[in-house]
């Protein structure tokens, strides 16, 4: 019985020693995930990249960055607040059809809100749209948030200049 008590005492002392000697430094000192102040703030869209180049502005030069083709995304933002809430705007590009002709138009649906959480470098944002709850994921690296969408939708044009929806992989970049 004495040897079991000795082993248990040694185990307890070992655990106490390990616990006391542990540092509280983050895994990557460049990203202190314990401090939301380094994460919080306003991030502005700096790129909306698609795997399919488009020529939305009709200048004869197609680009994979939709922000080079239209001003519809200008000023798009997401603000991460210290209480784990966020506010973001909903801007983009759409095809408007009046029955006979289709045109490319910008839309601005105003701001929406929700909550955010960070696990490692994975940022999740949860919000409600049309009564349905959604959670989107992005990667946080320094002062940049990158969201990747496989088989997303982007507006493009046919060879005749008619607007068309295209399936494309997307990478949306926000920078603080």
Image: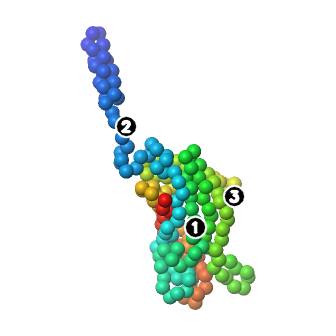
Real-space CA distance between mark 2 and mark 3, rounded to the nearest whole angstrom: 42 Å
If you read the primary sequence from the N terminus, does the residue marked by circle 2 or circle 1 appear first?
A: 2
* On-image quarter of the N terminus: top left
| Residue 36 in view (yes/no) | yes
The answer to which of 146 and 34 lies nearer the viewer is 34
Q: Write the residue at 52% across / 82% down.
A: 55
Relative image position of residue 108 (x, y in whole percent): 66, 68
Q: Say above or below: 49 vs 63.
A: above
Element on which disc 1 rests: loop
Q: Residues within 10 Å of mark 3 (few under 14, many from 20)?
A: few
Neighbourhood count class around disc 2 (C-alpha, 10 Å): few under 14, some 14–19, many 20 upward: few
The residue where tag 3 is placed is 130
Q: Which residue is mark 1?
A: 75
Residue indicated by mark 2: 24
Q: Earlier in the sequence, mark 2 or mark 3?
A: 2
Left or right? Give the position of 146 relative to 21.
right
**How far is the residue under mark 3 from the one under mark 1?**
24 Å
Residue 96 appears in which quarter of the rendering?
Answer: bottom right
Between label 3 and label 1, give the one nearer the viewer: 1
């Amino acid at each position: 019985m004495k040897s079991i008590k000795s082993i248990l005492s040694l185990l307890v002392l070992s655990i106490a020693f390990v616990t006391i000697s542990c540092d509280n430094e983050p895994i990557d000192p460049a990203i202190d995930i314990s401090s939301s102040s380094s994460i919080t703030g306003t991030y502005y869209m700096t790129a909306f990249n698609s795997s399919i180049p488009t020529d939305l502005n009709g200048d004869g030069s197609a680009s994979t960055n939709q922000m080079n083709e239209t001003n519809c995304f200008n000023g798009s933002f997401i603000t991460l607040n210290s209480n784990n809430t966020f506010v973001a705007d909903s801007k983009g590009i759409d095809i408007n059809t009046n029955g006979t002709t289709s045109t490319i138009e910008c839309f601005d649906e105003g701001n929406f809100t929700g909550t955010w959480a960070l696990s490692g470098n994975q940022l999740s944002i949860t919000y409600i749209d049309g009564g349905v709850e959604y959670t989107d994921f992005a990667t946080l690296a320094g002062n940049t948030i990158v969201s990747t969408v496989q088989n997303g939708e982007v507006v493009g044009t046919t060879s005749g200049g008619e607007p068309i929806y295209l399936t494309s992989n997307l990478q949306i970049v926000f920078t603080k």
